[in-house]
Amino acid sequence: MRKVSLYKLKTKIGPFEKWLFGQKAAHEAVRIAHGDGVPAGANIAKHADRLNKLASVGKVGGYALVGIGLAVCCIQIAQLVKHIVWWEVKWTWLVVQG
């Protein structure tokens, strides 16, 4: 079960493994602690909390990117409408003059 969970973690993290865990692989960083006076799941809990914090930051960043993208889209639509109206005015002026 632990081996399958570590494999899933490694595949979901993908190329960010080196960035998240430094020089260690995911299975090395999340290894069960065998030291004296250290709970067995200490490393697992530490990295789980760290990944949860990063996920929440990523979630907020995603919302920010959606908001920025929506604003840029609205600006581009407004500029396009302005351009179309300008050409319609120019076209009607040319037709009236012609």
Image (cartoon, helix red, strand yellow):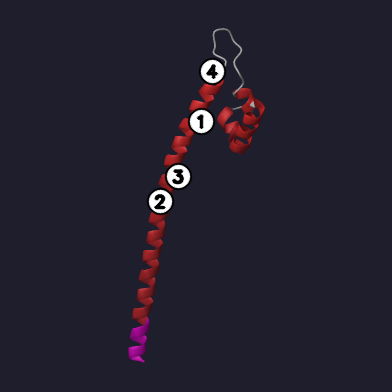
Q: In the image, what residue type sits under mark 3?
A: Gly
**Other residues around mark 4 within 10 Å, as few (<14) / some (14–19) / many (≥20):** some
Which residue is the site of mark 3?
62
Q: Please report contact status of discs 2 and 4: CB closer than 8 Å, yes or no.
A: no
Which residue is the site of mark 1?
51
Location of the C terminus by quadrant is bottom left
Frontmost of labels 4 and 3 is 4
Q: Position of residue 9 (x, y in %)?
A: 60, 33
**Other residues around mark 1 within 10 Å, as few (<14) / some (14–19) / many (≥20):** few
Give left or right: position of 19 versus 65. Answer: right
What residue sits 37% from the left and 60% below the top? 75
Image position of 21 with respect to 97: above or below:
above
Looking at this view, name the residue that lies furthest to the front: 1
Q: Of label 4 and label 1, which has the lower sequence position?
A: 4
Q: CA distance from mark 3 to mark 2?
A: 10 Å
Which residue is the site of mark 4?
42
State yes or no: residue 4 in magenta: no
Q: CA distance from mark 4 to mark 3?
A: 30 Å
Q: Of label 3 and label 2, which has the lower sequence position?
A: 3
Q: CA distance from mark 4 to mark 1?
A: 14 Å
Report the disc number at residue 21: none
Q: In the image, what residue type sits under mark 2?
A: Ile
Q: In the image, what residue type sits under mark 1?
A: Leu
**Other residues around mark 2 within 10 Å, as few (<14) / some (14–19) / many (≥20):** few
Nearer to me, 11 or 89: 11
Image position of 41 with respect to 62: above or below:
above
Which residue is the site of mark 2?
68
Q: Of label 4 and label 3, which has the lower sequence position?
A: 4
Q: Position of residue 48 (x, y in %)?
A: 52, 27
Q: Secondary structure at mark 4?
A: helix
Location of the N terminus by quadrant is top right
Residue range highlighted in magenta = 91-98
